Amino acid sequence: MPDTIDKNKTALVVIDLQKGIVALQTAPHDAKSVIANSAKLCSVFRQYNMPVFLVHVGPSKDKKDSLHPIVDQTIAPKTTMSDDWMEIVEELAIDPTDFIITKRQWGAFYGTELDLQLRRRGIDTIVLCGISTNIGVESTARFAYEYGYSQFFVEDACAARTNIEHEHSINYIFPKIGKVRSTEDILKIINS
């Protein structure tokens, strides 16, 4: 059975394509490619009046909502964030119809209004992309699965810090909770 996307019930969710994150090394796709493919998706979703959710992450002004669990390995070294660290990249061309979701942890559902805004619009399917495949995207995808959303993962609009991290999510996690497709696959499905 061919893939179909109901334009009235599908939204795009773009994870963490913000200046502080896209400046880091990514694999197997460089950040520039991930941004370009995500921008294509944003454009076609907007063309068909389909919701676009742009998610970014960062601490609150007082930084008291940061998580401090005991871990064996931290994600990134503690560095000072630039003033524009949380800004969504210009290439996504934020539109007044887009929804901006600010999260304080890995996933875009916990502690945000993402689920509420999706459900109010009758959305039952999400197309996910962004950085990092195995952290922000996968955490959001796991919640979405548990909340009952159908999902498409856009492989070439995602990247992680290493090939292994990206490929693990793409090959072992995402096929169990949704469908993995390319940017061109999604564009063809929507334009059909």
Image: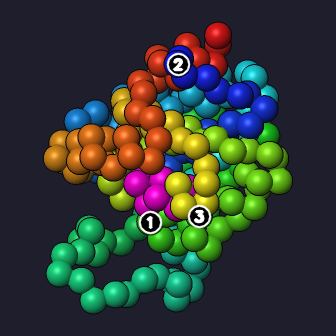
- Please give the residue where the numbered disc 1 appears in the rendered image: 106
Q: Nearer the viewer, residue 184 or 150?
A: 150
* Residue at the spot 24% in from the left edge and 83% down from the top edge: 71
Q: Amino acid at mark 3?
A: Phe
Give the x, y percent position of residue 5.
64, 26
Q: Amino acid at mark 2?
A: Met
Say what secondary structure mark 3 lies in: loop
Does residue 124 show up magenta in the picture? no
- Residues packed near mark 3 inside 10 Å, few (<14), some (14 to 19) or many (20 plus): many
Label 3 or label 2, whichever comes before in sequence order: 2
Determine which quarter of the picture holds residue 94.
top right
Determine which quarter of the picture holds residue 42.
top right
Say what secondary structure mark 2 lies in: loop
- Please give the residue where the numbered disc 3 appears in the rendered image: 109
- Residues packed near mark 2 inside 10 Å, few (<14), some (14 to 19) or many (20 plus): few
* Residue at the spot 45% in from the left edge and 35% down from the top edge: 179
Q: Is residue 98 left or right of residue 33?
A: right
Q: Nearer the viewer, residue 68 or 179?
A: 179
Q: Amino acid at mark 1?
A: Trp
* Residue at the spot 52% in from the left edge and 19% down from the top edge: 1
| Total numbered circles | 3
Residue placed furthest toward the right: 120
Query: Comparing marks 1 and 3, which lies closer to the viewer?
Result: 3
Image coloring type: rainbow
Give the x, y percent position of residue 107.
49, 63
- Please give the residue where the numbered disc 2 appears in the rendered image: 1
